Image: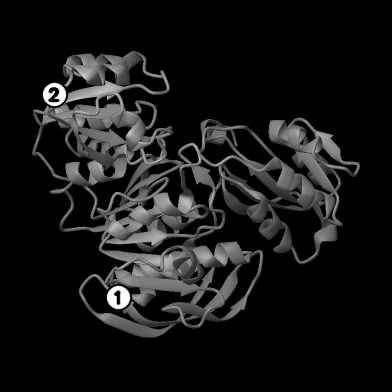
Amino acid sequence: MNILVIDMTHGGVKIAVSYAKRGHVVYCYDIYNTLKGIDRRMLDIYGIELIQLEDLKKFHDEIEVIYPIHLPLTQDEIKKYNPHLKYTFKTHHKAIAELLNDWGKDIDKIEITGVKGKTSCAFMLKEILIDDNPLLLSSLGALIYEDKNEIVLQKNISITPANIKETIDLAYKLANPICGGEIKDRIYDCAIFESSLGASGIGDVGLLTNIVEDYPIARNNSSASIAKKQVFNCDIVCCQKEDLDRYYRDIDHPKVNSFSLKCKNANLYVEDITYSLDETTMNIAYSNINTKNGELVSGNIEIKTFAPGPHHALNVLGVVATALSLNIDESRIIAGLENYKGIPGRTNKQIIGNSIIIEEINPGINTKAIEASINMLNNKSDYIISIGGDYGITCEEIDEDAVGELIDNLNEEIILTGEVGKSISNKINKKITYIENYKSVYNLAIENNKNLLFIYRSDYRKLSER
């Protein structure tokens, strides 16, 4: 069967080459016209022809189309180029699951998706599983940990499904350098993969952090909740109870573990919580958690970790549910989360001079996240609150009108910064301060002995600058 891989921008080259190596006849359609350099040469090396959809009229019999879940074309729009072909369609996520069908059967595997909190959850789970030398793909890079030491496999890497396989391949090359020696399958004993818009299904546990905003994708033909439904292809799924009831009532899955900050009908919920910017204490009850070894476990656990606001605490619940699903001892969960202090370049706290600096930096920052971050401050008058950011390459774009309306209704003074801040300033009715360079906002807070809440929508490509 011929295979057509669509979208070279979001991992299509890796998928196409992987199928070509297996002896398939593969074609590619570069819908965004971004293919160049080494990627273009890779297609040539493996005899993969680059075509346009109009070329489908030359094909006969049948074709399998592999496409990203957010493709701005419907299946019917593709079929019209040659209605006589027999078509099968497969997402990039499912293709990766197929390519990795025989990989990692003897290790714990976690896939993480959701609108918010994916990277934070990935690094919390890394702390819990640190003794197992975890392999980790996140929006901050492809990493591996050996004896608790971080090894960077690749820094600038996206969380498209194809990069799950790329991360595994990079780890294999690290374990088996060209100079030779004994061939090793791997140097890690567990794997954690953050993935955008769904999961491939290779995870022993799939964690769906939240659907805090169900934004449209695929030229408004689909949505985040529909794309992330793919997480239910994992053996066990951990999902927020409220999202499960709202978006996935029709799901028939034998092993779903729900979690909630408020709903005591969830499998895992908070009985008591004390928030602090330093260390939040959570008393968590859990009941009938489905586990990897087939047990149902129940109990209570007290967690102390960096979770200054409810949206951070919700991430912690998802992580605890995931760890319990893998039959990880409570002692390891407690110790790992106590060791988690936030992530530089994401949510973290630091002291500079006499100022407390709280950073909420995220490529997918949105209105609800901004509001939640502001609400976590006990003494807002002690803080300079700054909102801004870069225009980036994530599928989710910030709703500037909604942010402008939020700022208009806040009593607190807000400083806007960056190119996003500049654009938002035009959506606001009240007088507002704009400072172009975000570093100047830090200087303003430190020089005046003020604390700073820095909420910034960061372009993935600029994370290394933070």
Q: Which residue is mark 2?
A: 60
Q: Amino acid at mark 1?
A: Asn
List the single residue furthest toward the right. Answer: 431
Q: Position of residue 184 (x, y in %)?
A: 13, 43
Given residues 273 and 367, the one toward you in this image is: 367
Q: Nearer the viewer, residue 78 or 310?
A: 78
Quadrant where the N terminus sits is: top left
Q: Secondary structure at mark 1?
A: strand
Q: Mark 2: few, some, or many residues within 10 Å (few <14, many ≥20)? A: few
Q: Is residue 371 left or right of residue 208?
A: right
| Amino acid type, callout 2 | His
Task: In the rendered view, tell whether residue 206 sits above or below residue 66.
Answer: below
Residue at position x 53%, y 50% in the image: 343
Vertical placement of 378 versus 120: above or below? Answer: below
Residue 290 - label:
1
What is the quadrant of residue 248 in the picture? Answer: bottom left
Residue 302 place in picture, x, y as percent = 49, 79
Q: Is residue 285 left or right of residue 230?
A: right
